[in-house]
Amino acid sequence: MTTPRDAAATYCGAKSNSMSQILAICLQTDQEALAVYTRLGGLFAEQPELAAFWTKMATEEEQHVKFWQAIIELDKISCIPEVFDDPGEVIAELRQTLGKIRALDPLLQDRIGIDKAMIMAFRLEFYLLHPAFEMLFNYARDLEFLSNVITPETDYDRHIDKFVKALRTFGDVSPEMELVGETMTRLWSENKRLAKLTNTDYLTGLLNRRGFFTAVQPFFNLAARNATRVAVAMADIDRFKEINDTHGHDQGDRTLVRVAGSLKELFRKSDVVARFGGEEFIVFMYDADPDTLREVGDKMTRAIRAMDADAAPCTISVGLSSAIPGQGEGADLASLIKRADEALYRAKSLGRDRAALR
């Protein structure tokens, strides 16, 4: 008989090791960056203000190293899914970046001037702006597993800002160097925007379908290992076409945003709420109590029913299903979602504005 641990191991064994390689290279890259800033702090020890700046940058890189170590441990436990369309290309680019950062170390063997140090640090920070870093920061941002680890995305804006200010404070800043600082800030902002677009629904701010599966798969694998029950709720706005036809598409969009916000507030941080497509939403619940699923569904319908009508009252129908991954009908995530979807259609057939279980 297949055990939950066997089910998780099967998925992990089938998954390519490209994500593990990418995470390992990211860790090595920030370890090298930490070494560069530590060495710069020592080279300018006789200039306390400048030495303090390099030390601060090194401390922040140390936090980034801890982040990669934590997410690598998560990957060992629950197998992080692929988040890149072409992981082979990402691995090649990251290896090239790592090589360029390692090439900076020989340049730090002798004493160098402030301007040269600043240019070298700029090159380092530029290499660290590879889009793969922000994709992974964005992915890990809301993971409950990393709640005790500082996700670099939360402070990288300040990290870049401090570096740009240091260019002006300590270096002989030319118009070209000013442009360099502005370019770094814009590049980071663009990376963040693109990473968010990949996994986030532009209208509601929730995860989109792709983002949902990327976020949930590690939870599902971990549940398989620990024989922990999980649940999925599928919710659909009732008669949404009528809202659009009667009140206009702008009102329809506002309704989607309000429903998304209400569902997000209703669930725990460890639950994953996403827009599955159109007027349909999905919620993944880890460590779910099957005896309270009916209550969860009723809370969802009540919350939407109680929203400010804003000229367009709406209700939702909800379908819920739970399982222990790897056991019975909960063999995989797709099966669990299919059962919740079947329950949703049952709720619709019974008159809408209600929850049903499967």
Image (cartoon, grey):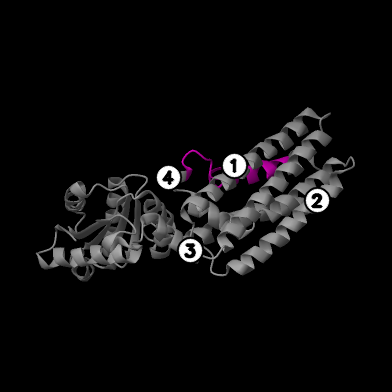
Mark with earlier residue (4, 2) = 2
Residue type for callout 1: Lys
Tell which of 161 and 269 is nearer to you.
Answer: 269
In the picture, which quadrant includes the C terminus?
Answer: bottom left
**Lower position in the chain sequence, tag 1 or tag 3:** 1
Report the residue marked by disc 1: 66
Q: Which amino acid, by three-letter code, is at mark 3?
A: Thr
How many other residues sit within 10 Å of disc 3, few (<14), some (14-19) or many (≥20)? some
Q: What element carries label 3?
A: helix
- Element class at badge 4: helix
In the displayed structure, would residue 331 be above or below residue 59?
below
Q: Nearer the viewer, residue 292 or 226?
A: 226
Q: Which of marks 4 and 1 is nearer the N terminus?
A: 1
Q: Nearer the viewer, residue 12 or 187?
A: 12
Q: Where is residue 273 in the image (x, y as percent from the top left)?
A: 34, 54
* Residue type at the position of mark 2: Leu
- Classify residue 97 as left or right of residue 73: right
Highlighted range, magenta:
146-166
Mark 1 or mark 2: which comes first in sequence? 1
Q: Toward which corner of the image does residue 343 lie, by quadrant?
A: bottom left
User: Which circle, 2 or 3, is nearer the viewer?
Assistant: 2
Of residues 87 and 132, which is closer to you in this image? 87
* Residue furthest front as drawn: 1
- Residue 43: where, in percent of width, then height? 83, 36
Report the residue marked by disc 4.
144
Determine the residue positioned at 27% across, 50% down.
Answer: 262
Q: Are marks 1 and 3 in contact (CB under 8 Å)?
A: no
Callout in the foreground (4, 2): 4
